[in-house]
Amino acid sequence: MRPKGDSRCRVPFFDPRTHYRRLKSRLDAAFFDCMEKGDLIHREQLAAFERHFAEWIGTAHAIGVNSGYDALFLAMRAAGIGPGDEVICPGHTFVACVSAIVNLGATPVLVDIGPDQNMDVRLAEAAVTNRTRAIMPVHLNGRMCDMEAVMDLAARFELVVVEDVAQATGAAFRGRKAGAFGIGCFSFYPFKMLGCFGDGGAVTTDDADLARTVRRLRFNGEDPETGEYHDHGYTALLDNVQAALLDVKLPYLEGWIEDRRRIAARYREGLAGVGDLVLPPEPAEGYRDVWQNFVVRTARRDELRRHLYERGIETLVMWKKPLWHHPGLRLGSPRLPECERLYREMLYLPIHPELEDDQVEWVIEEVSSFFAAPAVRRGPSAPSLRGAEAGGRGNA
Ligand SMILES: *Cc1c(COP(=O)(O)O)cnc(C)c1O
């Protein structure tokens, strides 16, 4: 989000208005269609989007829910995870992952990350106990976890695999999309790969029983055909209007992914060997990366961030400090040195389909000029950068 009233911001981190304008006539038509028909809750537009989304991901079912959080929560609840169970998840992720686990009465077991910023699956194996029920690979920044290793581990220890695909809609491994390996949990938060115009999410699965359970749980436990309440559920449907708008956007997603891949390739080329900058590693063989975020690392992160801000380039730091540094989350004090180091060094450069070529070049130029100049000692990050921090949900 653009700092309010800041006209210097020449490269915004997100650009929701341009994004809307590019599809305005189609989006407006879908919106007015819902209004004219009075199709607001649980109507055909929701069913149509779910069909198209399931087909695109390559699963038998997609169930639209309120948010990515709800997708995680309802997926795990439907899989029977609850008090006494442990769920392994990465230490570097959005808070919703651990909150969904805690709110089910289960215990999150945080493990450290590898150079790809995703869960280190060898450490996940070491964290398995006789209470472990599930593993939650989070495909961060548009990059999939090592799903061969995750699926192998899950098979050996009979773990439920809950994929957090919130930042990686469209990513794939050997042609199979993220969300088609385990139970897929997606977010349609506006700045994710496929965003709606408010909150939204989905669960994907091939398991008909699990799909039916999630469908009921999101609808207060009710079977809409019979009116029977099968359990105590939640009010957690994906809004019909949001589904209609998502259905308009879905056919464009492939093109937007290509835009992101092109920008990432240009950043990688233009920023190679600049200063102490560490660029995201090449995607491993067989993996298709969708570049939800482009995260660089540098020991001079705060200085670089200020330099870019002063030149009209908006960057983000997500998140401010590790989850277990928030006493309110009661996560104890795990020792995750790779996560700790990342929090000091990471900086998110702008990457989204609305970014023009000259904006990308401007970013490369300004990052390079920062490292070309002699270092100046300065204080911690300026409070004026705060306005740009609002997008705390990992995205971008
Ligand atoms: C955004 C996000 C979520 C949660 O999605 P919401 O729709 O915001 O509830 C979960 N996990 C990750 C990694 C995310 O980035």
Image (tube, rainbow, N blue to C red):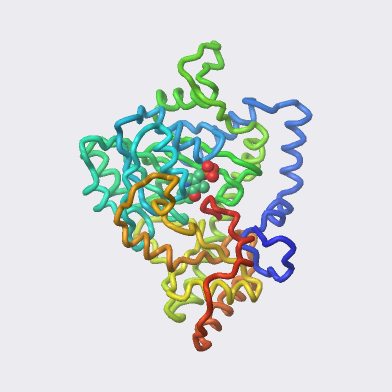
Examine the rendering and report whether any part of residue 169 can be seen.
no
Q: Position of residue 386 (x, y in %)?
A: 61, 62
Relative horizontal placement of residue 247, taking residue 169 as reference (left or right): right
- The x, y position of residue 177, in whole percent, is 43, 46
Name which residue lies at 53% across and 87% down: 373
Image-based side of 87 in relation to 94, left or right: left
Question: As displayed, is residue 19 above or below residue 317?
Answer: above
Front residue (pair 66, 175): 66
The quadrant of the rendering that contains the N terminus is bottom right
| Nearest the eye: 261 or 200 | 200
Query: In this rendering, does residue 109 appear at all?
Result: yes
Residue extending farthest front: 327
Residue drawn at (41%, 29%) of the image: 77
Count of number-bearing discs = 0
Q: Nearer the viewer, residue 8 or 364?
A: 8
Residue 15 quadrant: bottom right
User: Residue 252 location, x and y as percent?
Assistant: 61, 49
Residue occupying the point 51% across, 31% down: 63
42 to 117, vertically: above or below: above
> In which quadrant of the rendered view does residue 58 lie?
top left
